[in-house]
Amino acid sequence: MEDISAALERDLACLDEYDYFFRPDLLSGKVAFITGGGSGIGFTIAEVFMRHQCSTIIVGRKFERLSKAAKKLEILTGQRCVPLKMDVRKVKEVETALDKALEHFSQIDVLVNGAAGNFLCPASKLSYNGIKTVIDIDTLGTFNLSKAVFNKCFKNNGGGSIINITATLHYNGCPYQCHAGCAKAAIEAMMRHLAVEWGPHGVRVNCVAPGPVADTEGLYRLGKNLNPNFAKKFPLQRLGTRREIADATVFLASGASALITANTLVVDGGSWMAGFPPLTEMKAHSKL
């Protein structure tokens, strides 16, 4: 089994370099609240936001990891990053964390719902508590944060942008991902309802749907056991990167997407059309 510290370092790896597609001050003066910002894709979203002069609040359940991530990002970018411990499933913790965030910045302009739970499991062996936990974190957690930020920050302050990190699992159906696929599908439905209700308040609600992303813990756990050439069947014939997901999120947070709402931006190199590795291959390598 891989050393925990090695996995942590990979999850908190900053970009070696960054070529700006957008102007560096694109998000200057803005504040982003990012759930799941202490690791993986959420960490890189925070980094790229901060490289565009955005202040951030990163939240999660492991404060030590969040603190380490925040210090690393502040040193790298020179921007402020506030770590806050919070469980997206617990409404009181959500509201308390949001109040603390507002004490630091007095405003929130962008909410990125990136907290997620997932694991590989056949539907026939999926426990009732297992599917409930994933839906609680992904779907209900997204609603909890969206409602709280809308009421406290967006409703009477000119609006803002909500960006949900979803997936493409439910487009074709993916083996061993019934729980996660259902949770992400529900988030996309929620996006449309909230966009309709909150649009008059100046709130835009969108999703970014990554496909397989190379430099993530999730793909490391699954992909290390699969045929290394499985991405060759994708239209762009490669995996995505955390930076590419972050850049798409920056676009939806910026004025460049001012008329875009109720949309899912799929960032996957066309992989969802090619389907996932065969069930037999996944079963053989995942030992399920």
Image: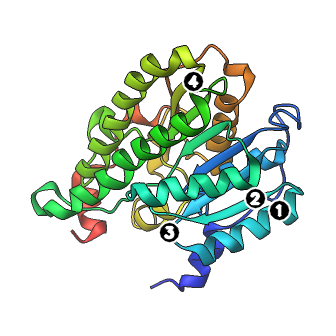
Cβ atoms under marks 2 and 3 closer than 8 Å: no
Q: Earlier in the sequence, mark 4 or mark 3?
A: 3
Cβ atoms under marks 4 and 2 closer than 8 Å: no
Residue 16 image-quadrant placement: bottom right
Residue 210 makes an appearance in the image: no
Circle 4 residue: 203
Circle 1 residue: 74
* Label 4: how many Cα within 10 Å (few below 14, some 14–19, many 20+): many
Circle 3 residue: 61
Using the numbered discs, state the Cα–Cα distance from disc 3 to disc 1 in whole angstroms: 20 Å
Q: Quadrant of the C terminus?
A: bottom left
Cβ atoms under marks 2 and 1 closer than 8 Å: yes
Looking at the image, residue 130 lies above or below residue 251: below
Looking at the image, residue 186 lies above or below residue 60: above
Query: Which mark, residue 238?
Result: none
178 relative position to 233: left or right: left
Q: Quadrant of the N terminus?
A: bottom left
Residue 45 makes an appearance in the image: yes
Q: Earlier in the sequence, mark 3 or mark 1?
A: 3
Query: Which mark, residue 81?
Result: 2
